[in-house]
Image (tube, rainbow, N blue to C red):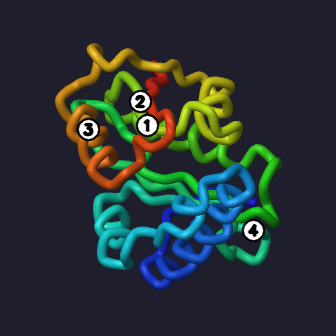
Amino acid sequence: MHIRAVRLDELPLLQDIERAAGLCFRDIGMPEIAEDEPLALDELARYHDTGLAWVMADDADGPVAYLIAERVDGNLHVEQVSVHPDSARRGIGRLLLDHLAAAARSEGAPALTLTTFTQVPWNGPYYARCGFEFMADDGLTPGLRKIREHEAAHGLDRWPRVCMRRAL
């Protein structure tokens, strides 16, 4: 397997990966998350166009996971990282996060940030194992506050949610 930039013709595959990865939320009582539609193709294309979209590709060069990010307050912010269940539990998500960290370092960003559910094992606890630390609400940057407000407006605060930061 290898990490490479996503190609425009693969954007529908990213949606399929996210749908498949999201199904496990149904098993923990979060069916609304499982049924939430992935980002639209034009939104995914925006990440491609900014150079902040990567896939983990299998030996046949087909995507099995992806990560998209954006620049928020001088850091690189993980917008989405999804691993297809058939490829889960192999360290692929961590490799994608490490790839993003290298990209962030190369452009002088001091940290990675993300928002996540605190009580979902493959969210908050997982990211903590990957070097992210929970951020207090009073320490959020303006961009992170805006992201959290947007998430709250879309009902994501129904479950405990938080910002996390990984210093580089």
**Vertical comparison of 149 with 23: above or below:** above
Q: Nearer the viewer, mark 3 or mark 1?
A: 1
Task: Compare marks 2 and 3 and give the one earlier in the sequence.
Answer: 3
Q: Secondary structure at mark 4?
A: loop
Q: Secondary structure at mark 2?
A: strand
Q: Position of residue 110 (x, y in %)?
A: 36, 22
Q: Residues within 10 Å of mark 4 (few under 14, many from 20)?
A: some
Circle number at residue 114: 1
Q: Residues within 10 Å of mark 1 (few under 14, many from 20)?
A: many
Is residue 135 left or right of 116 when viewed as pictured? left
Task: Compare marks 3 and 1 and give the one earlier in the sequence.
Answer: 3
What residue is rendered at 54% in x and 24% in y? 132
Q: Position of residue 34 (x, y in %)?
A: 59, 64
Q: Position of residue 48 (x, y in %)?
A: 37, 66
Q: Which residue is mark 2?
A: 163
Q: Nearer the viewer, mark 2 or mark 4?
A: 2
The residues bearing labels 3 and 1 have C-alpha atoms spaced at a distance of: 10 Å
Circle number at residue 72: 3
The residues bearing labels 3 and 4 have C-alpha atoms spaced at a distance of: 30 Å
Residue situated in front as seen by the camera: 159 or 70: 159
Task: Compare marks 2 and 4 and give the one earlier in the sequence.
Answer: 4
The residues bearing labels 4 and 1 have C-alpha atoms spaced at a distance of: 26 Å
Circle number at residue 58: 4
Q: Are marks 2 and 3 in contact (CB under 8 Å)?
A: no
The three-letter code of the residue at mark 3 reads Val
